[in-house]
Image (cartoon, rainbow, N blue to C red):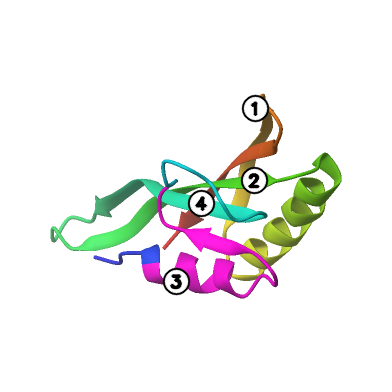
Amino acid sequence: MYEPKADVYAILSEIEDVTVYQNRPEVLVEFPCITFSVANNIPNLVLEKDIGFQRIVVVIDIYAKTSKESGTLLSTLEEDMREEGHVMVFNSDVPEDDISHITTRFNLLY
């Protein structure tokens, strides 16, 4: 079974001037930053009980000091993830005091 965390981390780590966390720390001290987690990784079996493909959902959150900065990161994130086969299926602003927060979801069939 394919486990996507290392590959997602590698994609996100290539974005310049951004700190990447696998999960959100209690206190965000470095901005901008990106957090991610694998929300779903379901193998679909074929008749021989082998894995035919996997449905993977990755949740990625962007935190920045300004809305402009988080929006720019969203565009970069979408492009970089799409280049690796991940399709954005959702994104939304999340109300936060004093920071800009965007949450996203990406699907991958592997």
Residue located beneath label 3 in the image = 7
Is 46 within the magenta?
no
Q: Residue at x 29, y 61 (%)?
A: 52
Classify 73 as above or below 17.
above
Residue located beneath label 2 in the image = 63
**Looking at the image, do the residues carrying marks 2 and 4 touch, with CB atoms under 8 Å apart?**
yes
CA gap, disc 3 and disc 1? 29 Å
- Please state, as top left, top right, bottom left or bottom right, where the N terminus lies in the image: bottom left
Residue located beneath label 4 in the image = 35
Q: Earlier in the sequence, mark 3 or mark 1?
A: 3
Label 4's element?
strand
Q: Nearer the viewer, residue 108 or 61?
A: 61
**Looking at the image, do the residues carrying marks 2 and 1 touch, with CB atoms under 8 Å apart?**
yes
- In the image, taking residue 39 as reference, residue 14 lies left or right, namely right
Callout 2, which amino acid? Tyr
- In the image, taking residue 13 as reference, residue 49 lies left or right, namely left
Query: Among all residues in the image, which is located at the extreme left?
Result: 49
Q: Marks 3 and 1: which is nearer the front?
A: 1
Magenta region, residue range: 6-23
x and y, in percent, of residue 99 in the image? 70, 36
x and y, in percent, of residue 61 in the image? 57, 45
Q: Marks 4 and 3: which is nearer the front?
A: 4
Q: Marks 4 and 1: which is nearer the front?
A: 1
Classify 104 as above or below 47.
above
Callout 4, which amino acid? Thr
- Please state, as top left, top right, bottom left or bottom right, where the C terminus lies in the image: bottom left
Q: Residue at x 42, y 47 (%)?
A: 25
CA gap, disc 2 and disc 1? 10 Å
Label 3's element?
helix
Residue located beneath label 1 in the image = 96
